[in-house]
């Protein structure tokens, strides 16, 4: 059934005319900007074409399963990841939840590194425990030793490298090899690498997750996540869950992510340079006991980073000297002016966060501070840190 207009159906009531179909995009308007296609319902020419099909690549069926804008973002991320396909989710945490739901059933066992982003582990230990999924935390430095933890009911092994806040580097290829030998899926939170500094699929991962909120968005103004899959089997598994979870994403946010992708390369280069200048300066300071930045040769796991990554990113942590108390650490954080106190990372603004209540950080929790450098001049950031360290 062809679209109608006032010429093809004359004499309609004005209320009916208000419902005119959306016009086609104007011929000859070759804009450089990502187009925003909104839409829940898409219409079909005949009933036989109205197939309710979640398989996103083939045709449009309903906005939830893809619009030109949301599918374009998925295609671009899949191409960058060198994956088979990428599903876009409403946020990084939603993307992580999608992977759990795709692979775990009642009675499943899942392994997650102790260093993982807190809410990922909490989702397993809280909501999923209620559905009889058992979550076991493992030492992030376990490498191929993960084989000893794999059980007949193990359905999923999570990796995150470097780990959130504590920055441990994981031997992902060794973990993936052990998992593959037992037929267990490996999912990686690849947000640190922005999907590009670590080639997840070349290193044996089945599913690579990214919070697009961070580097791809790049300006602290959207929440989006991506789940890239390595092959048809992972596509079918994640795709089914994506459809049933109703993970709708805003085409407007996807268009912002598509815009962010255009400057991802230059931003990452600049952020890496600035982070290294700042990290090396902090290493020389008497107030700082350790700088946890994977590109520094004495950072635990540096050799894994040098082997597997093509660059480093904007986020790293410092451990203040042994005699610093939680109160002094808080005075330092409060004294910073350019580093704003805020969660998240990967945007243009430098950020700082401390975790005095985190049991996971053990004895370091009073003295560990995470920094995210932004696009400010390195000399200004160093001056901000110098002044705050001295004031504290
Ligand atoms: C490593 C990591 N993964 C996932 C997420 C979740 O992303 P989002 O904030 O988009 O839900 C975060 C957020 O801070 C993160 O740090």
Image (tube, rainbow, N blue to C red):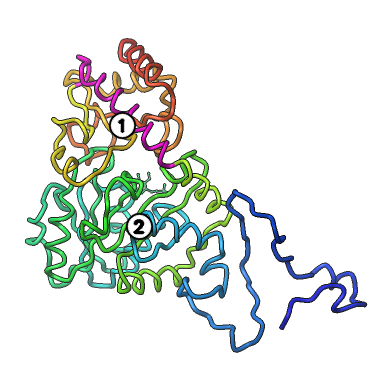
Tell me the magenta residue range: 264-288
**Residue 108: where, in percent of width, then height?**
23, 70
Classify 88 as above or below 355. Answer: below
Density class for disc 2 (Cα within 10 Å; few <14, some 14-19, many ≥20) is: many
Q: Quick one: quadrant of the C terminus?
A: top left
Q: Residue furthest right?
A: 11
| Image side of residue 356 versus residue 38, left or right | left
Residue at left 71%, top 83%? 1
Q: Which mark is residue 96?
A: 2
Residue at left 24%, top 26%? 367
Residue at left 47%, top 71%? 56
Q: Which mark is residue 207?
A: none
Residue 97 vs residue 129, the one in the foreground: 97
Q: Is 149 included in the stretch rendered in magenta?
A: no
Residue at left 55%, top 52%? 255
Density class for disc 1 (Cα within 10 Å; few <14, some 14-19, many ≥20) is: many
Q: Is mark 2 within 8 Å of ligand 1?
A: yes
Residue ID for mark 1: 370
Q: Marks 1 and 2, how far apart in space?
A: 22 Å
Residue 328 vs residue 176, the one in the foreground: 176
Q: Main secondary structure of the magenta part?
A: helix
| Image side of residue 26 versus residue 203, left or right | right
Q: Earlier in the sequence, mark 1 or mark 2?
A: 2
**Residue 337: where, in percent of width, then height?**
44, 19
Callout 2: SS = helix
Callout 1: SS = strand
**Residue 173: where, in percent of width, then height?**
16, 55
């Amino acid at each position: 059934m062809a679209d109608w207009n006032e010429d093809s159906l004359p004499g309609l009531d004005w209320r009916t005319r208000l419902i005119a179909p959306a016009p086609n995009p104007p011929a000859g308007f070759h804009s450089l900007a990502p187009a925003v296609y909104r839409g829940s319902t898409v219409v079909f020419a005949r009933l036989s074409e109205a197939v309710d099909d979640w398989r996103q690549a083939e045709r449009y069926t309903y906005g939830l399963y893809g619009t030109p804008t949301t599918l374009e973002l998925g295609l671009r991320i899949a191409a960058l990841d060198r994956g088979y396909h990428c599903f876009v989710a409403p946020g990084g945490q939603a993307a992580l939840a999608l992977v759990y739901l795709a692979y775990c059933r009642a009675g499943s066992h899942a392994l997650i590194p102790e260093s993982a982003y807190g809410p990922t582990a909490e989702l397993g230990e809280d909501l999923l425990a209620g559905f009889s999924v058992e979550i076991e935390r493992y030492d992030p430095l376990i490498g191929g030793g993960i084989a000893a933890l794999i059980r007949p009911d193990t359905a999923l092994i999570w990796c995150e490298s470097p780990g959130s806040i504590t920055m441990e580097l994981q031997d992902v290829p060794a973990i993936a090899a052990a998992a593959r030998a037992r037929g267990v899926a490996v999912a990686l939170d690849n947000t640190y690498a922005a999907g590009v500094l670590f080639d997840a699929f070349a290193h044996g991962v089945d599913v690579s997750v990214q919070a697009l909120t961070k580097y791809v968005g790049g300006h602290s103004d959207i929440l989006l996540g991506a789940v890239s899959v390595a092959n048809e089997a992972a596509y079918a598994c994640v795709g089914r869950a994506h459809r049933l979870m109703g993970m709708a994403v805003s085409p407007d946010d996807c268009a912002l992510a598509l815009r962010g992708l255009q400057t991802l390369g230059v931003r990452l280069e600049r952020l890496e340079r600035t982070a290294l200048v700042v990290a090396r300066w902090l290493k020389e300071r008497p107030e700082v006991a350790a700088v946890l930045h994977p590109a520094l040769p004495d950072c635990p796991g540096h050799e894994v980073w040098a082997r597997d990554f093509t660059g480093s990113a904007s986020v790293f942590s410092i451990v203040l000297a042994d005699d610093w108390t939680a109160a002094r650490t808080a005075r330092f954080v409060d004294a910073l002016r350019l580093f704003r106190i805020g969660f998240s990372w990967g945007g243009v603004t430098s950020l700082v966060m401390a975790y005095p209540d985190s049991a996971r950080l053990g004895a370091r929790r009073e003295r560990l501070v995470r920094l995210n450098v932004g696009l400010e001049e390195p000399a200004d950031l160093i001056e901000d840190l110098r002044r705050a360290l001295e004031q504290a």
